[in-house]
Image: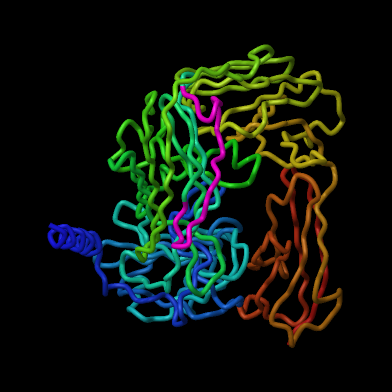
Amino acid sequence: MKKILLFCLISCSAYSQSEYPQDYFRSPLDITLVLSGTFSELRSSHFHSGLDIKTQQKQGLKVYATADGYVSRIKVSHYGYGKALYVTHPNGYTTVYAHLQKFSDRIEKYIKECQYEKESYEVEVFPSTQELLVSKGEVIAYSGNTGGSGGPHLHFEIRDNQERPINPMLFGIDIQDSKRPFVSGVYAYPKDDAAVINGKNERVPLRLIPQRNGDYDVEKIIAYGHIGFGVTSYDKQDLAPNNNGVYNIQTFFNGNKSLEIDFKRFSFDETKHIKRLIDYEYFKTKRSRIQKLFIEKNNPLSLYKDAYDDGYVKVEDSTSSVYKIRIRDFKGNETWVNIPIEGKYETVKSDTEDGENKTLIYANQPTELKSGLVTVNFYKNTVYEDVSIDFRVSSDTLFLHEDHIPLQKNFYINYDLNHYKSEHLDKVFIARLYGYYKKPSYVNTKRKGNILSASSNTFGTYTLAMDTVAPTIKPVNFKDKKWLSKYRYLKVKIDDDLSGISKYRATVNGQWILMEYDYKTNMLVHDFNDNIVKDTKNDLKIIVTDNVGNSSTFEATFFRK
């Protein structure tokens, strides 16, 4: 019987791996792959859609086409993926290479022609199937730190023909990993008011007891009713200290499977619903992500499998039960958590919040809140379930609860400025107040007459702010009237204290020049190798505009030969 079971496990494992071609894609880099981020790793507002591969703390490593194909998309943006390249392959998959420093010469030439034609650093183009063919092993780019990258690395993805990202390790991209996942926290949750855990009707932290073999026991809990569990867990690879995401979580109640969370694939449409997987309130207050091992109302994630009673377990009076959590990484290293449960009937007074002075937001219907000159609109399904929130307006400030409640859509704020007295009315915008000092941060604001509108997907405090100060522009590596014949780059620093940079434009002798903008360093850089600047005497003009229309102009003359 044991031999048959072992054969079944091996067969199932082999079948799951053989769904994806194992020798089709090579590594995108020619170094040992070490990860700073794994596939489906939990991020602040999304699941990580690829592998973050370390590049030895430097930029400029050669990035190779992992298989034959054609460049189907090139996107250059200030934020997000920065410089990104998409290669579509004959087998229907697309590989993505992001945060690049630059592209290979012919691809760089292609995209710069597009940038100069559009007179924009930010571009997105979709070459035809024959324009930019690439071969497996061909250098297509160089690794970098562009966009929202927090340090030099290569973000690498494999997507199917429906644009769904899939764990690249399923295709044979190998990462050295012999370490078991580890657990830093386990929690129990009541499903409803009738459930009790250790005398409480609220989230209860449980005491972990590490075992010598790497597994964990949990101090016995006393419970009654329908309850769920949550776990904070991470994985580590052999060659890096990073706390990474796990590959698979399964739960069992008295030997029967209760739930499985499989992190091998997801769609971009659902990634925002990570807020429903994690305990959002705990994350916002404690900065730690508890993965809830039960499925709450209006949770559309496709990661779940074999969910019995949505992952909750029913604990009855005078019973002894065992709940187990099995956590695995991609290489099959696994860790178990064992939770003994004593069933004991108890009642407890619910410590629900006082509903006075709270405003109810409905999940299944639109809700409009209005106070003074401020209106907030919640469309249907903005919240996952009906919630009571704090809502009040004081002068120009809107207090809209704390950012503890997950939202699946944006809500909309409208300020009526008809009674707002200011000679700079056109410089007023909607801002969110952040941090201890409540610093205003610009929220994308639209104006129609004297109505200001903005949308957001996070609760918090919003107010009206005014920006009458123009951006600053400072040369970094040159001065007016300077010879720059031996310089390859022209560097300028731009900044705006309040509403932020909206756009910029640079010309030399009246002709537009490409300047790459890095918002992390506030730097504009022009590469003279673009061969746009050919005259000896050159008049440089840079115009920078912030988000409310304040504009600054910088002019200087430089010489080259």
Res 527 → quadrant: bottom right
> Foreground: 478 or 150?
150
Whether residue 272 is in magenta: the answer is no
Instruction: Determine whether, in the image, residue 454 is placed left or right of residue 18.
Output: right
Is residue 72 among what the camera can see?
no
Instruction: Determine whether, in the image, residue 87 is placed left or right of residue 84.
Output: left
Is residue 165 among what the camera can see?
yes
> Foreground: 72 or 197?
197
Measured as percent of width and height from the top left, residue 189 is found at 49, 32
Give the total of numbered labels.
0
Measured as percent of width and height from the top left, residue 77 is found at 56, 58
Q: Is residue 267 above or below residue 237?
A: above
Measured as percent of width and height from the top left, residue 548 is found at 74, 41
Instruction: Determine whether, in the image, residue 351 is placed left or right of residue 157.
Output: right
Q: What span is in magenta?
A: 195-216
In this view, the residue farthest toward the top is 356
Quarter of the C terminus within the rendering: bottom right
Q: Is residue 18 above or below residue 471?
A: below
Quarter of the N terminus within the rendering: bottom left
Measured as percent of width and height from the top left, residue 389 is found at 63, 21
> Foreground: 300 or 59?
300
Q: How is the image coloured?
A: rainbow
Instruction: Determine whether, in the image, residue 556 is placed left or right of residue 509.
Output: right
The residue depicted at 80 percent of the width and 53 percent of the height is 471
Q: Is residue 48 above or below residue 518?
A: above
Res 95 → quadrant: bottom left
The residue depicted at 54 percent of the width and 75 percent of the height is 55
> Foreground: 163 or 287?
287
The residue depicted at 35 percent of the width and 33 percent of the height is 310
The residue depicted at 60 percent of the width and 42 percent of the height is 283
Whether residue 202 is in magenta: the answer is yes
